Amino acid sequence: MLNVSNINPKKVEHYSPNFVRGFRKAKSIMDKIKTRGDVELYMLKGRVWLPAQMVYMVAVRQLSEFIQGFKPLQMTPNHIEASYDYIL
């Protein structure tokens, strides 16, 4: 098993600067996400939507409305199942 306390960030940055840059950018984006609107703003802006993706986004919006008060990254499979049970 990997012991993360032994990982030297400076060595990782030296051997893989692109990984470290990407990781920092991803962390920055994830820290900004507080609502479903933030997901669309930070992760989906500028995308061309296919019909299947539009249907998916409608489902995500409905789920978000059902579980009011949760941040998108706090959702669990139980929330999804409960929303389907509610719809049916």
Image: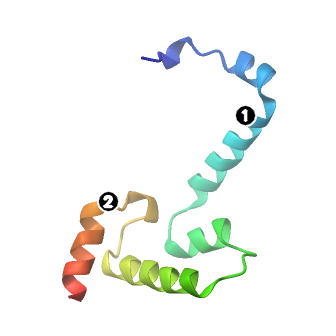
Check residue 20 in the rendering and tell me which mark sits there, or answer none. 1
At 29% from the left and 61% from the top, the residue drawn is: 77
* Horizontal side, residue 16 vs residue 77: left or right: right
The answer to which image quadrant residue 74 occupies is: bottom left
Element type where label 1 sits in the image: helix
Q: Residues within 10 Å of mark 2 (few under 14, many from 20)?
A: few
Q: Amino acid at mark 1?
A: Val
N-terminal label among 1 and 2: 1
At 73% from the left and 16% from the top, the residue drawn is: 11
Residue 23 point in image, percent of width and height? 67, 40
* Horizontal side, residue 68 vs residue 33: left or right: left
Vertically, is 58 above or below 79? Answer: below
Q: Amino acid at mark 2?
A: Thr
Residue 18 point in image, percent of width and height? 79, 36
Query: Which residue corresponds to mark 2?
Result: 76
Along the line of sight, the residue nearer the viewer: 48 or 28: 48
The answer to which image quadrant residue 32 occupies is: bottom right
Residue 48 point in image, percent of width and height? 72, 80
